[in-house]
Image (spheres, helix red, strand yellow):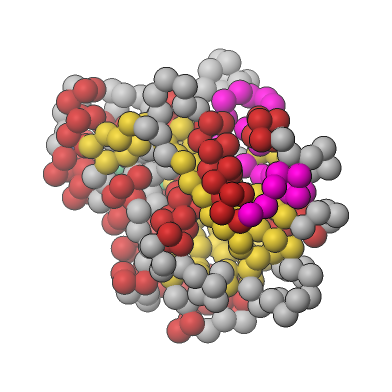
Amino acid sequence: MCDKLGMSENMMFVATGSALPKQVWTNEALIKAKGLDSSDAWVKERTGIAQRYIVSEGETTFTLARDAVKQALGRAGVSPEQVGVLVVATCTPDLTFPSVAALVHGDLGFAGECAVLDINAACSGFIHALAVAKGLLAASAKDYAVVVGAETFSNLLDWNDRATCLLFGDGAGAVVCKKERGTGNERRGILAVSLGADGTAAPMLQSSAGVARGQKAGVVLMNGREVYKRAVRQMGSRVATDALLAEAKVKFEEVDWLVPHQANARIIEAAAAEVGLPMDKVVMTVGEHANTSAASIPLALDVAVRDGRIKAGKVLLLQAFGAGFAWSGAVVRW
Ligand SMILES: CC(C)(COP(=O)(O)OP(=O)(O)OC[C@H]1O[C@@H](n2cnc3c(N)ncnc32)[C@H](O)[C@@H]1OP(=O)(O)O)[C@@H](O)C(=O)NCCC(=O)NCCS
């Protein structure tokens, strides 16, 4: 169930950007506001989450995506007209259609010659979007791709369900990537990608409704224990990690940073231990952002780029797992 993507032309990372909602909610404040039978200690101990950002009036998945893209393009010194691929990973779009990517395209003035689409692979979506963008950029006449993870899971929560509503947060992260044209940087960018799925597990983590099932977005339904076990098993697979590193021609010892999907600190710690990476090589942002689904990895990348942990030449292992179940991994040289 694991498909390796062989890719010849490469795509390098140029800059990151991010956007978080104005309002930050600590566990305590949210528990009080929603009248939940829970505690800050319970949530911190089971998940490592201390707070999350939640959208308020005027903020949507589109506005967060747009702001993250604007920041990333500004830092890259790239104009929207230079971009040939714009992919947004999200499962909480503003509208059923058009895509969030189309809304960003229209608002920021991207060129007509640009592949513009959303991808839904739930929490795993950002790495899927990187893989798709890399393929599309190879076929584009332009040099730049923008890949975004943007979510407002707060729109998809049952605020009476303490087992799910305290786990998620809103936000967006974006990366600007450049086509590698044989300038000696062939060993930078995305060195290997692996995507996989088990669709038979769909009922374990899903929304309760949808366009074709009640014309509603629904709320998150989750078998937390099973998701936890399967996430650790998949993200902690040393065999899958070794296969991905071998494809990337990178030794295990060369990995500088593990940047996993930020669902839960315990999942991340258990998976890192299984893989054999110490926690001082793991970028962890779940305490501050909670689970922002497809936005969690690009948000974590942005944090670690800004604080200097991720810089040119560093080798990253990206890993994600989520609804579907769909999972993904990538080896990147920044
Ligand atoms: C959700 C999760 C934190 C629950 O922790 P857990 O140790 O598995 O807890 P359980 O679901 O077995 O529930 C244990 C008890 O805690 C209670 N509980 C659940 N959420 C609670 C909360 N926020 N506060 C207090 N008690 C809570 C349950 O109701 C249950 O009570 P009971 O024993 O009286 O029935 C954990 O399963 C998890 O992190 N799963 C993965 C979720 C995830 O990351 N999903 C996204 C993947 S992309």
Residue placed at 49% from the left, 60% from the top? 319
Q: Quadrant of the C terminus?
A: bottom right
Residue 4 vs residue 68: left or right?
right
Q: Position of residue 121 (x, y in %)?
A: 58, 44
User: What span is in magenta?
Assistant: 77-102
Residue 114 vs residue 122: left or right?
right
Q: Quadrant of the N terminus?
A: bottom right
Residue found at the very far top of the displayed protein? 214
Q: Position of residue 240 (x, y in %)?
A: 53, 70
Residue placed at 71% from the left, 76% from the top? 186
Q: Is residue 96 magenta?
A: yes
Q: Position of residue 320 (x, y in %)?
A: 49, 55
Q: Is residue 236 above or below residue 51?
A: below
Quadrant for residue 244, please give it.
bottom right
| Viewer-nearest residue: 248 or 69 | 69
Q: Position of residue 4 (x, y in %)?
A: 67, 66
Residue placed at 48% from the left, 46% from the top? 18
Residue placed at 74% from the left, 49% from the top? 83
Ligand 1's quadrant: top left
| Viewer-nearest residue: 270 or 29 | 29
Q: Is residue 129 magenta?
A: no
